[in-house]
Image (tube, rainbow, N blue to C red):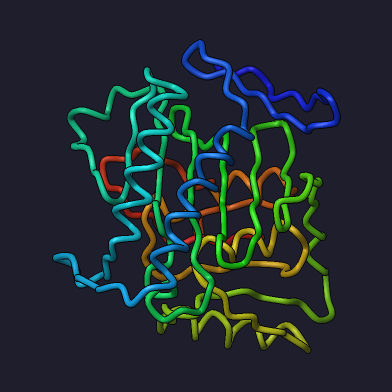
Amino acid sequence: MTKSAQLVSEAGTTVLNITAADVQIDALKVVEIALQAGVEVMAIYKTDFTVEHKADESPLTEADLAANRIIKDGLNKLTPTIPILSEESLVEWEIRKDWQYLWCVDPVDGTKEFVNRTDEFTINIALVEGNRPILGVVHAPALGVTYFATLNGGAFKIVNGGEPFRITARPLPIDGPIRVVGSRSHQSTAMVEYMNKLNETRKEIDFVKSGSALKFCLVADGTADMYPRLAPTSEWDTAAGHIVVKESGKTVVQYGLEEELVYNKQDLLNPWFICS
């Protein structure tokens, strides 16, 4: 079972440790893996890269594949006994249904943002125990910002390679103005209807568009108050951001059910959810 993450200080360096599958994992080593992938992603981002499309018409670039390779190599060295589920290397349910731990990875979350060069794409790495994330890293290489968290260890942010500092979400205002963050590339009819209803109860709503798992992180660091998602997402889109925002003091619950999102399901698609 997971032991509570402990924040310790060694030679002035903040370290978050969590134990999974009898292996002690330093969250900053996972951050390092994300940073390494980010270097390669940014090298490709600065070129005239080509864009392919998967069977579901979602875009795929060489950055997705390069980051996937770097992350898998890094995680396999760090925790050789913990399997990896990645958007770019899926695993059948019959194999993963008995996994107690897994890494859930999106090598480049927000590939549309990558292709459109908005800078709002991230590298997501999450450690899942059973059906809940217990460690997560969300790295936005073009923005120079990294978020990470461990279960019971708090949420942290790193800006431009500086020291990690703890972040705390701000409480959702009972009344008055609120800031809602939503997708830059995926606006559903249901989301429009939700915002219309919200407008009936709130005098002022500031809607902030953002891409990828950054939306979770903007809630986690207090930039936004809530993130409703009434459109499809997959587990690798949300697992890392989920633990970051949860450790900041917010929740991620299924829309209309008030039950937390769960992971390593047979169907890797998430239900709609509200992060607030």
Residue 134: x and y, percent? 57, 33
Q: In the rendered view, tell whether residue 240 sits above or below residue 74.
A: below
Name the image quarter holding residue 60. Answer: bottom left
Question: Considering depth in this image, is 110 or 247 the residue closer to the camera?
Answer: 110
Q: Is residue 66 left or right of residue 259?
A: left
Question: Considering depth in this image, is 122 or 263 the residue closer to the camera?
Answer: 122
Instruction: Kindly give the residue lying farthest to the left in the view shown.
Output: 55
Q: Looking at the image, which residue is at 51% across and 72% down?
A: 211
Check the picture and name the quadrant holding the N terminus.
Answer: top right
Q: Is residue 107 left or right of residue 122?
A: left
Residue 111: x and y, percent? 38, 68
Question: Considering depth in this image, is 100 or 196 the residue closer to the camera?
Answer: 100
Q: In the rendered view, tell whether residue 60 sits above or below residue 197.
A: above
Residue 104: x and y, percent? 41, 41
Instruction: Kindly give the residue lying farthest to the top in the view shown.
Output: 22
Residue 6: x and y, percent? 74, 23
Q: Looking at the image, which residue is at 32% across and 54% down?
A: 269
Q: Please state the total of marks drawn on the protein image.
A: 0
Q: Is residue 211 left or right of residue 108?
A: right
Name the image quarter holding residue 186. Answer: bottom left
Check the picture and name the quadrant holding the C terminus.
Answer: bottom right
Question: Considering depth in this image, is 7 or 51 the residue closer to the camera?
Answer: 51
Q: Looking at the image, which residue is at 47% across and 15% down?
A: 21
Q: In the rendered view, tell whether residue 165 sits above or below residue 84.
A: below
Q: Looking at the image, which residue is at 40% across and 70% down?
A: 231
